[in-house]
Amino acid sequence: MTHDYFFSEEHNAFRETMRKFVSKEIEPKIEEWEEAGCYDRSIFNRMGELGFLGLSYPLEYGGADADNRMSVVFWEELVRCGALGFPMSVMVQTDMATPSLNHAGNHEQKEKYLKGACSGELLIAIGMTEPNYGSDLANIETRATLEGDYYRVNGTKMFITNGTTANVINTLVRTGGPGYKGCSLLLIDADTPGFSVGKKLRKMGNLSSDTAELVFEDCLVPRGNLLGKEGEGFYALMAGLEKERQTTCALSYMAAQVALDESIKYAQERMQFKKPIISHQVIGHMIAEMAMDVEAMKRIFYHAAALYDAKIPCNKEVSMAKLFCTETALKVIDKAVQIHGGYGYMREYKVERLYRDIKLMTIGAGTSQIMKHVILREMGLRV
């Protein structure tokens, strides 16, 4: 179901294009990618060819200069592939690793890196989390020391999506003293001597997306790869944080929508006590509750997305949507597995995969606990 009050004819036309693309070129490959633990790198080139990877970026750098609602359509339709891993890898490219580049990068950097990201020629990861620092990014330890025209980088990053396949890592480093003001962003090419993938990480879910530990050992990175000014890296990241958290909302409520659709289909076909299980009140009520929750998730998210489109400050609303969508999706997908019974525990059913995939959404892009902290702060109840 689409919401015509929120989307225009142009958005809906793009939805049809995306839906056909996902059905034809992504969904048939998901099982293969899940088994391999990574997508086929060529899919990014294909999506770049079709203009999918730069929807919100300027025409000058290969983007489409589209509004936020177009990105919403893009996110929603990607999830119809029935897995969250690959869509998450795409959203890292389009809406997590590149917003700070667009916000703080100079023309030369955008010409090389942003244009490459929009075309799919370059795959970009975002290097923030470290083995000892996740929510507490202000205290990262990866150090970049300026030596003439180069920064010497040493440190380790953890849980990096696209880490094994990325050409460039948009990396949060410490160039100054303690706290946020000592953090900067460096674009580090994967072929830089001293850079290596420490290991590819094995995960519970999101298997069609690669995740890695990255190691920097005396990497010499050109000074020209500094995004913006020294000490302003964290603020450049924050400029894209609302977009990143919106992607997590979309991943969550659309995973719940797919689980709901699968549950309705299964409940109409599965016979118990000589009638379809959807005829049993307990199952019917579960489905009604799931449908209500999916609608509520979309409503709170569309409100936040509309504020973002209107350039109205919406950190509180986006954080509320992120918290509500991720936690509610967990409940909806749990009910979907329950409706499927023993089959819901089997790998060949989509709900089993979604059950494993969805948990990460309450952790990534800010944990549920951090979201509550942000909401309280935005309400003026905590500094």
Image (cartoon, rainbow, N blue to C red):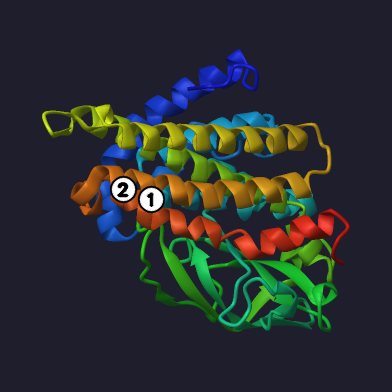
- Which residue corresponds to the image point at 66% horizontal and 71% vertical from the top-left? 135
Q: In front here: 318 or 127?
A: 318
> Is residue 210 left or right of 153 when viewed as pictured?
left
Give left or right: position of 208 versus 71. left
Location of residue 33 with respect to 227 vertically, above or below = above
Residue farthest along the top direction in this orientation: 9
Q: Nearer the viewer, residue 102 or 111?
A: 102
The residue that label 2 is drawn on is 337
Q: Residue at x 27, y 30 (%)?
A: 278
Residue 216 rendering spot, x and y as whole percentages: 57, 81
Secondary structure beneath disc 1? helix
Does residue 72 show up?
Answer: yes
The answer to which of 380 and 172 lies nearer the viewer is 380
* Residue depicted at 51% across the width and 38% down the height: 293
Could you tell me which residue is drawn at 82 percent across and 36 percent down? Answer: 311
* Quarter in which the C terminus is drawn: bottom right
Residue 22 % position (x, y): 38, 33
Q: Are marks 1 and 2 in contact (CB under 8 Å)?
A: yes
Q: Amino acid at mark 1?
A: Asp
Q: Is residue 48 left or right of residue 231?
A: left
* 124 sits to left or right of 114: left
Between the C-alphas of marks 1 and 2, the distance is: 5 Å
Q: Is residue 279 above or below residue 31?
A: above
Mark 2: which amino acid? Val
Which percent across, then down, holds residue 80? 40, 36
Residue count near mark 2 (Cα–Cα under 10 Å), binned few <14, some 14–19, many ≥20: many
- Asked if residue 114 shows in the view, the reply is no
In percent of width and height, residue 118 lies at 58, 42
Give the structural element (helix, strand or loop) at label 2.
helix
Per the image, the residue denoted by label 1 is 334
